[in-house]
Amino acid sequence: MSTVEAICLVGWGAIGQRVAALLRARGASARIVGIAVRDPKEVEGTMPEGAVHLASPEALAATGATLVVEAASRESVLPFARAALTAGMDFAVSSTSALVDVAVLDELVELAQRSGRKLIIPPGALGGIDALSAASRLGLDSVEHVITKPARAWLGTPAEQCCRLTELQEAEAFFEGSAAEAATAFPQNANVAATTSLAGIGMHRTRVRLVADPKAVENMHSIRACGPFGTLEIRLQNRPLATNPKSSEMTALNLVRLIENRTNALVL
Ligand SMILES: NC(=O)C1=CN([C@@H]2O[C@H](COP(=O)(O)OP(=O)(O)OC[C@H]3O[C@@H](n4cnc5c(N)ncnc54)[C@H](O)[C@@H]3O)[C@@H](O)[C@H]2O)C=CC1
Ligand SMILES: O=C([O-])CC(=O)C(=O)O
């Protein structure tokens, strides 16, 4: 028996629209029933058939969705996750930098437990999060994550105060610190650091380096983890999304995978 998953999206930007387009093109067993954005004009003329605009988190409850997928902003996570979990829906987080705040993470996990639903952290722009999470069950000695993006992807972030992004000739590492510091200061570019931390050894022990590379055309992620399990080394060269160079195509693809796995008999 095949089922159709009813989904609400929070955010209708580069990732949200790409996910919707991929689900439609692939004929996935998923129906987008609601889209939350602050300004309804943003969805005018592009809303998937049968979907409604949601003006607030409280509007989720009436949609009948079983899964809410956030691809909006750090600020959107707490109010929309609260509303979704309370209404008996699972909630998938893209803006994982929101979870650097332990009070937010604890509240949402507790709410998910009480409501019998799931707070889901998809791999986002990453791969290998399954292996890292598996390895962490034996304990890990170290996790390092290097994020290298084209210089233009760092425009409009505090990287502008660390280096002259538009004049760079060579790659420049402009930040080194913990994942907590990286995700807090760069919520549009370093959600992945929070994701790596949640899967591995936490926000404070995960070391992060951020690099602006004027010659790069892709968003690169290099992760190295060591522990009693052995060593893990992963390197992704992600194509950026056409409408937002800060975000990778892989993020949308991982959401499509998550959504399709909800109804597929074979889960991969
Ligand atoms: N976990 C990961 O690996 C990755 C996470 N991201 C994060 O995913 C999120 C979405 O990324 P993009 O689609 O590229 O961004 P975008 O800027 O293209 O689109 C954001 C959308 O969310 C809406 N929005 C923002 N705040 C909102 C709020 N409080 N309530 C309702 N709607 C709101 C905007 O109006 C817009 O429609 C960002 O926070 C980004 O940093 C992006 C790439 C990878
Ligand atoms: O898409 C990426 O490569 C990573 C990203 O923006 C994030 O973690 O916020």
Image (spheres, helix red, strand yellow):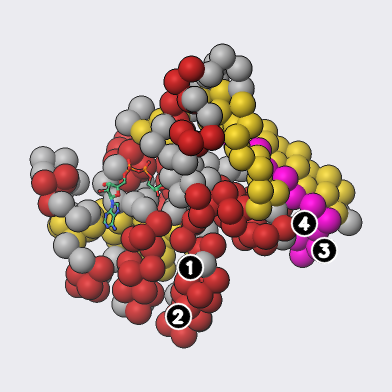
| Distance between mark 3 and mark 4 Cα atoms | 6 Å
Q: Are marks 3 and 4 in contact (CB under 8 Å)?
A: yes
In the picture, measured across the screen, residue 123 lies left or right of residue 67, that is right
Quarter of the rendering occupied by the N terminus: bottom left
Task: Return the disc, 3 or 1, that comes first in the chain's sequence.
Answer: 1
Where does label 4 land, which residue?
135
Q: Residue at x 15, y 57 (%)?
A: 52
| Distance between mark 4 and mark 1 Cα atoms | 21 Å
Q: Are marks 2 and 1 in contact (CB under 8 Å)?
A: yes
In this view of the protein, can residue 141 be seen by the observer? yes
Where does label 2 land, which residue?
111
- Determine crowd level at label 3: few under 14, some 14-19, many 20+ residues with C-alpha closer than 10 A: few
Task: Return the disc, 2 or 4, that comes first in the chain's sequence.
Answer: 2
Residue 80 position by quadrant = bottom left
Q: Residue 138 — which label?
A: 3
Where does label 1 land, which residue?
119
User: Does residue 103 sit above or below 257 in this rendering?
Assistant: below
